[in-house]
Image: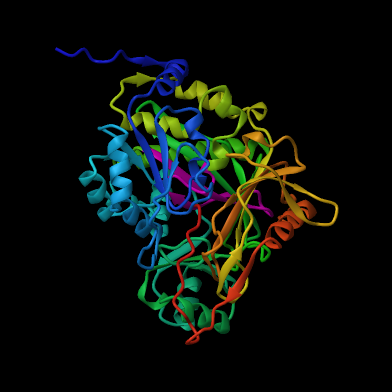
Amino acid sequence: MTESPPKLHGVSDLREFFRTNQTPIYFVSPTAFNLLGIDRWVRNFHYVCYYDSFEGSHPNVFVPADRQAPEFESIEDICNFLLSHGEVTTWMGSQGSGGRVVFVMFDEETERLAAEAGLRVAHPPADLRHRLDSKIVTTQLGNDAGVPSVPNVLGRAASYTELLELAAGAGLGTDLVVQMPYGDSGKTTFFIKSEADWDKAAGKEPLADEELKVMRRIEHRAIAVEAVLTRCGTLVGPLMNDITGHPELTPYRGGWAGNDYPATMTAEQKQRARDFTQRLGDRLADEGYVGFFEVDYLVDTVTGEIYLGELNPRISGISSMTNVTAGAYADMPLFLFHLIEYLDVDYECDVDEINERWARETSVDVWSQIIIKETGGDVELLNRAPRTGIYRLTGDEAAELNRWGYDWHWIADESEAFYLRILAPGDYRYPGADLGALVTRGRLQTDDNQLEDRCKRWITGIRAQFAGTPIVRQHPDPVTPTSFKMA
């Protein structure tokens, strides 16, 4: 009879377990960005990617040589392409059996392909994640958990007149924020205070066909936090400021474009946000959910109230930041508490003790990240693009590659930044495309939500290194690849 492995007690045992892990674990995604650096902690951790950010130089990143593919419309499409690719499945088979696989986004087809490849998906089921990802369901779950949303009403409107009637019934006024159930990077969030605003939004998305969340517009600061629902309770990570809607970074008004931390909040507000996150974890447990989730909060800058914005039941765009906090090094990255839930290991840990430790100001140092999107209106075939590595700003407003590097752990100080290439020569640059991600020490956004001058210099310096050949449009709205955001 095979003996069961001994029960693990506390963080020290968990760290030792991951350092000697024998199970192949794969992160399948367009790029390695979200979980970059996790392979420092977990033996046999691999990244399977579509974009060749490292040009073959990262020892734990696998990119198939043949990337000829049909047009992608989502991150799920990319993951499914990779899992059905002969090069990928052959390489995975050479790493050993019984592997686990994690994603940012996946669907039922991804689950089927993973099973065919002999892999177990280390996430809750896709159908559960999809249901919980709805902004409508999020609002309802928050209400159940005692986590308030901005004053709102849920309902349908086929015209601006019907929208005003819906809002009037809830006393929301006429300066409104309207959200569809699903969407990312601000693409399905609309700021409406006139009929012209409604007509413009309705021209982009089928508002009349969906149940809408209609909110009173408030002056706010956007805050993000990740957490993990474990068998021992809900662990809450560091609170961060969102960097959203800046036209230098994204064409989407209100669209996510990065983060910095620590969050600009009072001690009382931080504790309230952490309490809210634990309540949401308890409510998600009732739904059968286990593992990683991310929450966006809106802090009313006039009243100080904290409201639930969104709940993302998955790894997110801030995972990269969560995993480099001082707290992560004192214990271990938050993602590893997710992973252990899917590795058939019996363990226990004191969640209250870890949460108390991570809530201390001393457990948070200062980092920032920005996702640089294409903000122009043209489509180009790139013939030049900046490479992955450690960059330094020069005196003439340029950014120069200082040295090669896997990730941001090698940044010396605020004068340097790590840039991760997403689009490379031979790729298409198009409106909303993710060009690359930049991570640095220090803040890139002021307390009143303005980009620091240093941030603008980084954006200008990186953008200047792209060049391409314009693509002649055959009709006004050419089909172009989808923007695959990191979140």
Which quadrant would residue 341 be assigned to in this image? top left
In terms of depth relative to the viewer, which is nearer, 305 or 210?
A: 210
Picture coordinates of residue 472, whole percent (x, y) = 54, 83
**What is the residue that sits farthest to the left in this orientation?**
1
Asked if residue 432 lies left or right of residue 212, the reply is right
x, y (%) of residue 320?
Answer: 54, 42
Query: Looking at the picture, does residue 310 appear above or below residue 333?
Result: below
- The residue under the point 75% across, 37% down is 413
The answer to whether one can see residue 130 in this image is no
Q: Is residue 41 left or right of residue 386?
A: left
Q: How is the image coloured?
A: rainbow
In the image, residue 195 sits, relative to residue 65, either above or below, namely below
Q: Is residue 278 in the magenta section?
A: no
Furthest-right residue in this view = 395
Write the residue at 55% across / 38% down: 322
Which x, y percent locates residue 299? 62, 50
How many marks overall? Answer: 0
Does the magenta run of residues contain 295? yes
Q: Nearer the viewer, residue 445 or 22?
A: 22
Rendering quarter of residue 267: top right
- Within the image, what quadrant is residue 348 found in? top left
Residue range corresponding to the magenta coloring: 291-319
Asked if residue 300 can be seen in this view, the reply is yes
Residue 477 lies, with reference to residue 6, above or below; the image says below
Q: Residue at x 66, y 66 (%)?
A: 247
Judged left or right of residue 411, residue 176 is: left
Q: Nearer the viewer, residue 349 or 154?
A: 349
Give coordinates of residue 425: x percent, y percent: 56, 62
Instruction: State the quadrant of the N terminus.
Output: top left
